[in-house]
Amino acid sequence: MKDMIVVAVDAMGGDNAPLEIVKGAVDAVNEENRVKVKLFGDEATIKNELSKYSFDNSKIEIVHTSEVIETAEAPVNAIRGKKDSSLVRGIRDVKEGGSDAFVSAGSSGAVLVGGQVLVGKAKGVKRAPLAPLIPTEKGVALLIDCGANVDARSDHLLQFAQIGSIYMENVLGIKNPKVAIVNIGAEEEKGNALVKETMPLLKELDNINFIGSIEARDIPKGDADVIVCEAFVGNVILKLYEGVASTLLKTIKGGLLKNLRSKIGALLVKPALKETLKDFDVEKYGGAPLLGLNSLVVKAHGSSNAVEVKNAILQCVTFSDQDITGKISERFE
């Protein structure tokens, strides 16, 4: 276990940068003594934001960069062309050993390309999947892959299942996590060509607890701990998850404030409702790790606030302590 975990943070990436990014970094170092943050971005802007807070100056370092990668830019061109951007410099610092992990709420494409090209995949890993935690009735599940590998093959999905099991067992402490593949029915004969090809191969693996298919409607019930799919399907599931949750909250709020009677009822139910909805708050889960790389790269939501940024930074401590990178590499070497 390392005495200090150094996390490189893209201070200029995301819809709420640098305000929320800097605040999240300050909150992280104030909460966890073992975390040091290196903020990559415009030095004057970052200093101005830091002046609003109290923290141990030795725990936050500013690394000045002159460029920013915008969300609309082509990822490969941006990584190649903007070598002094906060995103590229931060990832390179991880590659060169200056930091243990990298966190960004910036361009998803650039984070994925930068992680795979600059940090590189761990030995034996064929594709590095993006894997967010999603809330369920029973806690959380790992959705793997949700955005990195749209045209995955069956051998990639086999690795995703094993990588997801390692993550859930060591980071979340779930022993023998249940693994399922996303399908349109429980029957083995159902599914597209990729699912039909992958299913029997998953059944043959003796190092995972494979329980078969899972339909999208059963994911929120918590029937599986690791949800395996290729990135197109995973991204649709994730976005629908977020959209339905947002719509339901707005609808419930509208109903509770409809008239005087409902407002009185809302006052009575508010404490219990607030406590119940805590588990479905995406802020508490931080970012989505790009698993299977030589070092940890975490993609936070583009709209991340300080709480999400803080939690994305703090999850790097558990990842490092449990040596997830080493365990994944060891599995596939």
Image (spheres, rainbow, N blue to C red):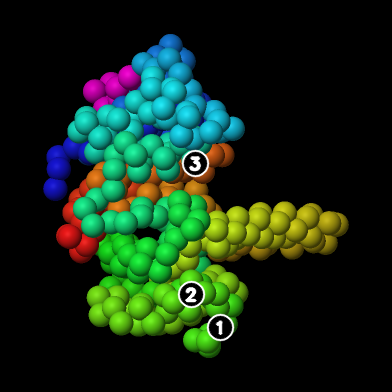
Q: Secondary structure at mark 3?
A: helix
- Mark 1 and mark 2 lie on one chain; the one further toward the N terminus is 1
Q: Which numbered circle lies on residue 207?
A: none
Find residue 99 and report its image quarter: top left
Tell me the number on the disc at residue 108: 3
Q: Position of residue 134 (x, y in %)?
A: 49, 60
- Asked if the residue under mark 3 is in contact with the one under mark 2, i.e. CB atoms within 8 Å, the reply is no
User: Does any portion of residue 35 appear in the rendered image?
Assistant: no
Farthest top residue? 44
- At label 3, the amino acid type is Ser
Tell me the residue at 45%/54% (across/down).
Answer: 149
Q: Which residues are magenta?
A: 56-63
In reply to whether residue 62 is colored magenta, the answer given is yes
> Horizontal placement of 98 versus 246: left or right?
left
Amino acid at pointer 1? Lys
Q: Is residue 46 above or below residue 129?
A: above
At mark 2, the secondary structure is helix
> Where is residue 300 shown, x and y percent of the image?
46, 43
Which residue is rendered at x = 63% and y = 59% of the image? 240
Residue sitting nearer the eye, 29 or 86: 86
Label 2 to label 3: alpha-carbon separation:
26 Å
- Mark 3 surroundings: few (<14), some (14-19) or many (≥20) residues within 10 A: many
Checking the image for residue 195, the label placed there is: 2
Residue located beneath label 1 in the image: 190
Sequence-wise, which precedes: disc 3 or disc 1? 3
Residue 184 at x, y percent in the picture: 59, 77
Element class at badge 1: loop
Marks 1,2: beta carbons within 8 A: yes
**Which of the two residues, 46 or 98, is positioned nearer the viewer here?**
98
